[in-house]
Structures are given as C-alpha cells and as structure tokens.
Amino acid sequence: MNTLKALIKRNTKLFFKDKGMFFASLITPLILLVLYGTFLSNVYEETFQESLKAAGATVTDKLINGCVGGQLVSSLLAVSCVTVAFCSNMVMVQDRVNGARRDLTISPVKSSTLAMSYYISTLLSTLLVCCIAAGVCLLYLAKVGWFLTVTDVLLLLLDVLLLSLFGTALSSIVNHFLSSQGQMSAVGTIISAGYGFICGAYMPISQFSKGIQHTVSFLPGTYGTSLLRNHVMRGTFEEMSHQNLPSQVVEAIKDSIDCNLYFFDNKVETCTMYLILVGAVVLLIVVYVLLNVLRGKKYK
C-alpha cells in the first residue's frame, strides 16, 4: 500500500510539474464552453423553437435558454471527462518514452501496483480539471437559466465521477500501447475530434441513421451523455409541464436530444444506464491491469 501511495504521489507530481500539460487539460473544457456557446447554442435554440412551434406551444425565453444551456453543459462535460483523461494519462506514455517505465517494471514493484498507480493518479488529475469545468458550467447555467435542485447538482457530480472513471480506464488501455510522443499526439487528436460524435455530444443520436443509432447504443459513453442530459435538464422539463406543455411534446423533446435512449427500439431506463457505465468501468480496469501484468512478466 505504501508503494502504491508513493507511486500515485510521484505520477501526480509529474503531471502538475509539466505546466503545459496541466494548463492544456484545464483550458480545454473552457475553450469548448466558449465554442459551444458561440456556435452550437443557436442550433440548439432553433431546434427547440421548431419543436415548440410544431406543437403550437410557447414557453418563456428563460426556459428556452435553460434548455439550450443544459444541452451545452451536458455535451461539454460528456466530452471533457474522456478527453481530459487522455491528457492526464500522458505521464504513463512519457515514462515509457524516457525509459522510466522499464526501470519501474524491473524493480520489485508489482505490475498490478504500477498499473493502478497510473490509473489512480490520472483519475485524480482528471477529476480536478472536470470538477473545475463543472463549476464553470454551473455558473453559466446560473446566468442563462437555472432550473436545477441540489439533488440535480449532486447527480451531475456523480455522472462526472463515473465518466471520469470510464475515461481514465479507456485512456489507460489505449495509452498502454503507445510508445512515442507522436503516437500520443495523434491519439489525442483523434479522440478529441471523434469522441464527441459517437457519444452523442455534438449531435443527438436521434438524428443519426438507424444503423448508426443501433451501433452507438453498444457504446458506454452514449449512456454517460444521456445521464448528464437527464440530470442537467430535469428541472427544465418539469418547468415545461408547469407551463402546461403537453406531455407528448415534452417526451418528443426528450427523444430528440437523447434524454430518452433506445436500444433497438426498447427504452433504456436510468438505472440500466448506470449499470452499463459501471460495468464498462470495471471491465476496462480489469483488462488494463491484466495487460500490465502480462507485460510485466514479459520484462521480468
């Protein structure tokens, strides 16, 4: 246990010591918030307005802004929890590049202990950045339209924790196979550009073709995005009901922005989404530890 603590401390210090890596991780969610608010807010607002117009319903501007803000915030956090994890996990790759990993591997330190030290230190760094991003997002919602309760905020933070666990596990497996700075940069670029689409953050899955919808329904990150959507926007949907919007209209809006997810036309309940996400985290961690144990035996 003391060895694990020492390695976690060592890896975490290395991450924060590299100011470029730390500030790149920290500023990424803030840049996304500005970009989302600048370019996507109008698209989301038009979508809501068209849905309400088709139903012959009207709501206050504050409610519309709250809906748009909730969709923006949930999209940003869903992407950041994974992309930031890949940035935070670069210490593992750097150790392999500069030879420190080989020195640690041939020492008496167990491969499983070394693997968990990288995982936990990456998780701590990722959570720090994502919690700061979540705080900024909550301030943004307070400005544009606040409909959250204390329970909603706590569930939002739980979602951030689970997605950070998932993102850290996924990045640990991917980065396990990287051995150069060039590979690290390439993977980071691919993840940053592509993950937001396949998890439904940039564009709702409901707007994809049926084939793509069925494919992405197998991906755990999809359910993480939906959980964030449900918890950030629960208050706005409740307010819609208070403003006498028909329940059919509210459900149609939920379908259009992936608050309601369907697995081959079967609605996925919230508790099932949690089970899928937690199960994926456990499975990925087990795979990651096994990969490190096998590599450790190879070196020894």
Image (cartoon, rainbow, N blue to C red):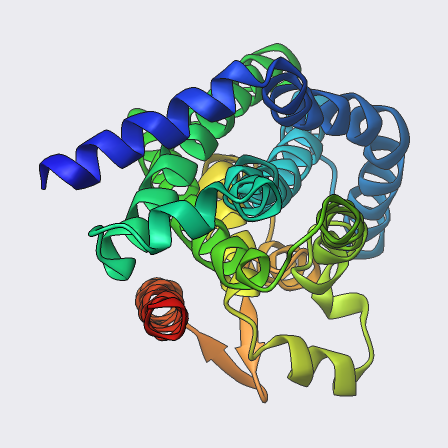
Indicate left or right for 256 with 166 as reference: right
Q: In this view, does 23 lie above or below 93?
A: above
Q: Residue at point 36% right, 36% down? A: 121
| Residue closer to the observer: 10 or 103 | 103
Q: Is residue 149 above or below residue 236?
A: above
Residue 209 location in percent, x, y? 82, 80
Any part of residue 238 in sight? no
Residue 224 location in percent, x, y? 49, 56
**Quadrant location, the C terminus:** bottom left
| Residue closer to the observer: 60 or 290 | 290
Q: Residue at point 50% right, 51% down? A: 167
**Quadrant location, the N terminus:** top left
Any part of residue 120 in sight? yes
The total of numbered circles placed on residues is 0
Indicate left or right for 160 with 226 as reference: left
Residue 49 location in percent, x, y? 83, 42
Rendered image quadrant of residue 115: bottom left
Rendered image quadrant of residue 11: top left
Residue 79 location in percent, x, y? 63, 45
| Residue closer to the observer: 73 or 171 | 171
| Residue closer to the observer: 93 or 172 | 93
Indicate left or right for 138 with 289 as reference: right
Indicate left or right for 76 with 293 as reference: right
Q: Residue at point 40% right, 67% down? A: 299
Q: In this view, does 251 lie above or below 155?
A: below
Q: Residue at point 55% right, 79% down? A: 218
